[in-house]
Every structure is written in C-alpha cells, then in structure tokens.
Image: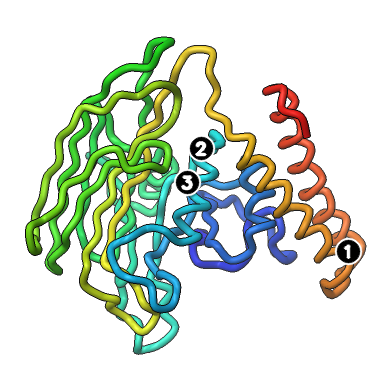
C-alpha cells in the first residue's frame, strides 16, 4: 500500500488492519503530525505538488510545501520527493502531478518501484522531465567530501512539451546556479561547478512562466530529490528547524488535548506517545549540538 495523498501520516493513522507498508509517504496536510513522524524516522518520502497560493505568479517555489521540505532536509532528514494526481473529478487530468523513480534493469513491479522511491532517485513534475547528477551521483546517493567541503560539478537537463523558462541548482534550499531562456524553450541543460562549504544536499528544479494549468492552480514545474553531501564529523542539523518542528508538535498536542474528538483510550495513548517520543528525539538532538532551548 502507498499512502501518497492521504491526510493521515503513518504514526497517527486511524485504527486499521496491520499491513506491511512497502512505502510510507506523506502529504502536507497535518504539519504537526508530519513533524512528529519525520522526527521518528517513520517517513520514506514526501508528496510535493506545485499548487501555489491563490494568485501566485508562476515560476517560483516560494510556498509552504517546498519550504517545509527544504527545512526537513536541512535538519538532516532524508525525504525523497514523490507526487500524485489526487484526481477527484473530471476537472483534474490524470498525471497532472506525478513522480518518476529510476528502477534501472529491475523488473517493473510496484515493489521495485517502491524500493527506487525509498532509495531517493526520483523527480516530481507537472510536466517537464528533469534529470540531475552531481559529480556523477544520482539523486539519493551520497558524495563524501573533505573536512573543508569541496567543489562539485553538477549537471541538470530538462525537456518539456509545455515551454519553460528557468533551470536551477539548489544547495541547502538556496539557488546557487541557474539558467534562463531568452523567451521560452522546450529543452535546457545546465552544468556548473559549485563550491560546497559543508554537509548538505543538492537538487535541480525547473519552472515555466506559463500557467497555472488546472483549476487547482498547478504551476508547470519539476524538482528532483537531493544528492546528499557528507562531511566527516559534521552532522547536517538546523536548530531553527528543530525548534519549528517542536512548535508544530506542541500545537498538535494542544489540539489533541483540547479540541479533537476524544478517541478510545488506546488510540489516545498511542497518539500522545507519538508526539512525546518525537519531542524527546528533537530535544536530544538539540542537546547533542549544545543548543540552548
């Protein structure tokens, strides 16, 4: 079973028969519960879709789904990107938002596809086909750097039936290289050498100035999962993100205790335990990094 598009992260799903999930994915619908499940390592991938805020201009990634994903990545949580159409009516074409996962020479089965997603070699798109490598490493793979970081050659290529305008390389959530089309294009490549000062992640993304393309205001965009950058004795960690996650978890606790419909005692205890365990993990990480809190 795959849980892309559901409103229930794994840790807080309603009571259901026990299933051995080959892939555990979340969508950005319950941020406090998501933060708890991410902190506890319960999530294999995160569902991303290019629906901007109402009235947003096409061609940017400055909205919550991407920003929260970047926050989690910057705190050391490895979360590949996936996507699904969420087709609830004729107004939404099948495949409007989708994910591609590279399975190599393996047989095309759901199990092998789920393994590929979990390994991180994916990209999510509402149109463009986007490929990315960093020093020859595909998304999901690691690059080991020296104590002072290093320089990495990145290569991204995009093709799209719908014209697009911009191709970017992102390091730890910030654009570090880009290429713009003079007007519009259906194909673009970008090769650059990027200085990396420490641990982190690299990914590619592309976007069009056209759109939105559905009644849900989907932008024309694509984004790869990250290549991870490893530096000896340096853990990728963001105190600001840890504090943000704790605030989300505390908000969920307030909802559970004061506003939510009271479930049966066993389910309530399980819900409280997920939130308490996640809070403990984040506090421990803050202590390990000598961050006052």
Nearest to N terminus: mark 1 or mark 3: 3
Image x and y of residue 243, in percent: 69, 42
Q: Is residue 212 left or right of residue 292?
A: left
Circle number at residue 70: 3
Q: Total label count? A: 3
Per the image, label 3 sits on a secondary structure element best described as helix
Circle number at residue 257: 1
Where is mark 2, residue-wise?
Answer: 74
In-front residue for pair 165/253? 165
Disc 2 and disc 1: Cα gap in Å?
Answer: 31 Å
Q: Which residue is situated farthest in the top direction here?
A: 147
Res 235 → quadrant = top right
223 to 57, vertically: above or below: above
Q: Is residue 138 left or right of residue 229?
A: left
Residue ID at (32%, 47%): 224
Quadrant of the image for the C terminus? top right
In-front residue for pair 119/48? 48
Residue ID at (37%, 39%): 226
Residue ID at (84%, 72%): 259
- Pointer 3 with pointer 2, Cβ within 8 A: yes
Image x and y of residue 86, in percent: 43, 74
- The crowding category of the residue bearing disc 2, from other C-alpha atoms within 10 Å (few below 14, some 14 to 19, many at least 20), is many
Per the image, label 2 sits on a secondary structure element best described as helix
């Amino acid at each position: 079973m795959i849980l892309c598009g559901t409103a229930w992260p794994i840790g807080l799903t309603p009571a259901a028969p026990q299933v051995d999930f080959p892939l555990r994915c979340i969508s950005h619908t319950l941020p406090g519960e998501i933060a708890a499940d991410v902190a506890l390592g319960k999530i294999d991938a995160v569902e991303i879709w290019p629906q901007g805020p109402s009235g947003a201009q096409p061609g940017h990634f400055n909205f919550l789904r991407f920003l929260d994903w970047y926050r989690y990545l910057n705190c050391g949580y490895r979360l590949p990107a996936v996507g699904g159409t969420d087709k609830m009516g004729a107004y939404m074409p099948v495949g409007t938002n989708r994910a591609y996962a590279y399975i190599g020479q393996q047989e095309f089965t759901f199990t092998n596809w789920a393994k590929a997603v979990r390994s991180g070699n994916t990209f999510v798109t509402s149109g463009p086909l986007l490929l990315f490598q960093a020093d020859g490493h595909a998304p999901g793979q690691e690059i080991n750097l020296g104590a002072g970081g290093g320089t990495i050659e990145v290569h991204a290529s995009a093709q799209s039936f719908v014209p697009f305008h911009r191709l970017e390389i992102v390091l730890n959530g910030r654009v570090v290289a880009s290429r713009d089309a003079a007007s519009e294009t259906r194909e673009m490549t970008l090769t650059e050498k990027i200085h990396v000062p420490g641990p982190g992640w690299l990914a590619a993304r592309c976007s069009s100035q056209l759109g939105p393309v559905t009644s849900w205001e989907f932008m024309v965009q694509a984004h790869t999962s990250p290549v991870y950058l490893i530096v000896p004795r340096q853990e990728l960690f963001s105190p600001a993100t840890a504090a943000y996650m704790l605030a989300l978890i505390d908000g969920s606790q307030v909802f559970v205790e004061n506003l939510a419909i009271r479930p049966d005692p066993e389910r309530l205890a399980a819900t409280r335990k997920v939130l308490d365990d996640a809070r403990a993990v984040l506090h421990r990480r803050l202590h390990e990094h000598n961050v006052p809190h």
